[in-house]
Image (cartoon, grey):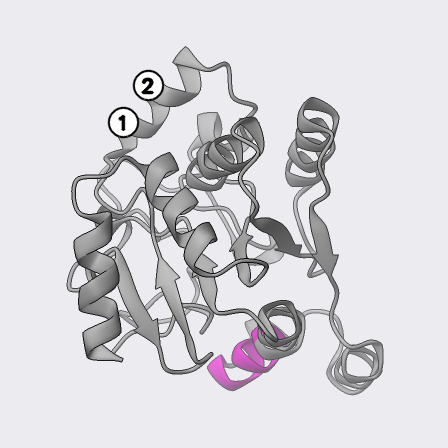
Amino acid sequence: MKALLEEIAAELEGKDPVSAISLLADRFPGKITFSTSFGWEDQVITDFIFKNQLPVSVFSLETGRLFPETYYVWNRTLERYNQPIHAYYPDAAELEKMVSTKGPSSFYTSVENRKECCAIRKMGPLKRALAGQQCWITGIRAEQSVNRTDMSNLEWDEQNQLIKFHPVFNWTLEDLKAYIRENNIIYNPLHDKGFPSIGCAPCTRAVQEGEDFRAGRWWWEDQSKKECGLHATK
């Protein structure tokens, strides 16, 4: 796998995001997908894919707890590009059991309960979305979190047994905003209200000036790693 990653990395060297995604789509025909949560990064990558008619499927995890503003962006994106964004929902039986026994807000009571909620609402659907895929495109950027600075734009995902590529990994927030302005990209209005990272509504708050990019995610937990498990880090 190391040799394969090195080979692909050499092919991608110096290529812009659209060319890089196109190359990967040629290498993994019909088995390359992009996950969007409709944030800044994901809206830019969605534009790369749909505007250039790249053969990459696009999906989102519909946790059932998203912000109304996120649904608004989802609808507007469908209207603009007229391309499908596949929705993956939690397993109904698992979700019903959790809510029936622990209530709709169990994630506030312990880290274990929060991780259980993430596992049901995100990890399970993600497994189904990635089944049979060989390459997963994501909107991860290096500056989003200290846990992500030691990653690279191309990596092997042991958890899901596929290659991951992050086309805007080295972009700054200003790079994203500039692209959004220049290309009139639809974006989540919560970004203008202090929400740099947007997840489920009950688990996301605005951040204050000087706070970490992901300080608004699961803010009630006293821990350094603000991740739900979708993008496992070492």
Instruction: Point out the stretch of residues depicted in magenta.
Output: 111-118
**In the depicted structure, whether residue 41 falls above or below residue 145:** above
Q: Where is residue 71 in the image (x, y as percent from the top left)?
A: 71, 39
Q: Where is residue 160 in the image (x, y as percent from the top left)?
A: 47, 79
Residue in the picture at 53% in, 39% down = 54
Q: What's the magenta bit mostly, secondary-structure-wise?
A: helix
Position of 163 with respect to 83 (left or right) is left
- Judged from the image, the secondary structure of the residue bearing numbered disc 1 is helix
**In the depicted structure, whether residue 177 falls above or below residue 112:** above
The residue under label 2 is 178
Label 1 Cα neighbours within 10 Å, binned few <14 / some 14-19 / many ≥20: few
- Judged from the image, the secondary structure of the residue bearing numbered disc 2 is helix
- Circle on res. 125: none
Position of 134 with respect to 88 (left or right) is left
What amino acid type is highlighted by mark number 1? Asp
Residue in the picture at 28% in, 67% down = 155
Residue situated in front as seen by the camera: 230 or 203: 230
Q: Position of residue 145 (x, y in %)?
A: 26, 55
Q: Position of residue 124 (x, y in %)?
A: 64, 77
Dividing the image into 4 quarters, which one contains the C terminus? Answer: bottom left
The residue under label 1 is 175
